[in-house]
Amino acid sequence: MLELEKARRYYASPGGAVHAVDDVSMSVSAGELVAIFGPSGSGKSTLLLLAAGLLRVDAGSVRFEGSDLARLAKPELLAYRRMKLGFVFQGFNLVAGLTAEENVAMPLLLRRMHHREAGERARAALDDVGLLHRATHTPAKLSGGEQQRVAIARALVGEPRLILADEPTGNLDTETGDAVLSLLSGLPRERGAAIVLVTHDARVARYANRVLGMRDGRLTEPDLEAQAAIGR
């Protein structure tokens, strides 16, 4: 479903080019949950942005279901993000003036779904993450953990084919994080979705079918401590 081939992304800096993603090749199949495990600054978030088409590769390719994202016209790339993709941003990216329900319904409304149906599906998604009772609250009235769960509900509400999650449990307590991870890990089996999540938490990586390490922009084997923690 998702394929990266020798993908590279550079950033300019006073000390020279920084190789945020450096010659990365990987593939993710439908029905698979893949965890990218590594420290902060290793290039994990940049890798997700490339997979989402929010950044373009400087070299190599990123393909979704055989289509090279770099070759898609803007309307096609927009349709990919709206119809096929769910993204859990590390910084949540919720709209401040909208309620939790309205934030979650937004992807459906952008597909021109009727407001009533979008609202019903948004409430069901909030219920899945244990936040139905906070549906009418704006982000300012939600804790960081609650905002994160709203962001997860928004990513899942459209039943996307591919879900990209950047530290999806970073602001959640252990019990809530495990509940969210159980929800995410069931989606490949139940819906045939593919999930790529990035994390520096070995406990999170335990839920994956496959774990890849990342350091200095390159994919590696997970380090020995991580392998022990995730039982691999």
Image (tube, rainbow, N blue to C red):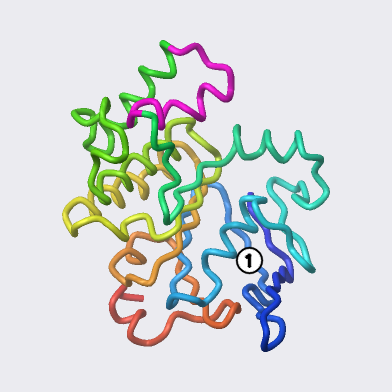
Crowd tier of the residue under label 1, counting other residues whose Cα lies within 10 Å: few below 14, some 14–19, many 20 or above: few
Classify residue 75 as left or right of residue 214. right
In the rendered image, residue 220, in percent from the top left (x then y), is placed at 54, 81
Span colored in magenta: 99-115
Q: Nearer the viewer, residue 33 or 160?
A: 160
**Residue 109 falls inside the magenta stretch:** yes
Q: Nearer the viewer, residue 211 or 77?
A: 77
Residue linked to disc 1: 26
Tell me what residue is drawn at x 28 percent, y 68 percent: 203
State whether residue 61 is above or below residue 164: below
Q: Nearer the viewer, residue 19 or 194?
A: 19
Which quarter of the rendering shows the C terminus? bottom left
Amino acid residing under circle 1: Met
Q: Nearer the viewer, residue 20 or 159?
A: 20
In the rendered image, residue 75, in percent from the top left (x then y), is placed at 76, 34
Classify residue 8 as left or right of residue 206. right
Tell me what residue is drawn at x 52 percent, y 68 percent: 44
Q: Main secondary structure of the magenta part?
A: helix
State whether residue 16 is above or below residue 199: below
Tell me what residue is drawn at x 52 percent, y 48 percent: 194
State whether residue 17 is above or below residue 49: below
In the rendered image, residue 188, in percent from the top left (x then y), is placed at 45, 45
In the rendered image, residue 111, in percent from the top left (x then y), is placed at 58, 23
Based on the displayed image, in which of its 4 quarters is residue 14 positioned? bottom right
**Residue 102 falls inside the magenta stretch:** yes
Based on the displayed image, in which of its 4 quarters is residue 4 positioned? bottom right
Based on the displayed image, in which of its 4 quarters is residue 85 positioned? top right
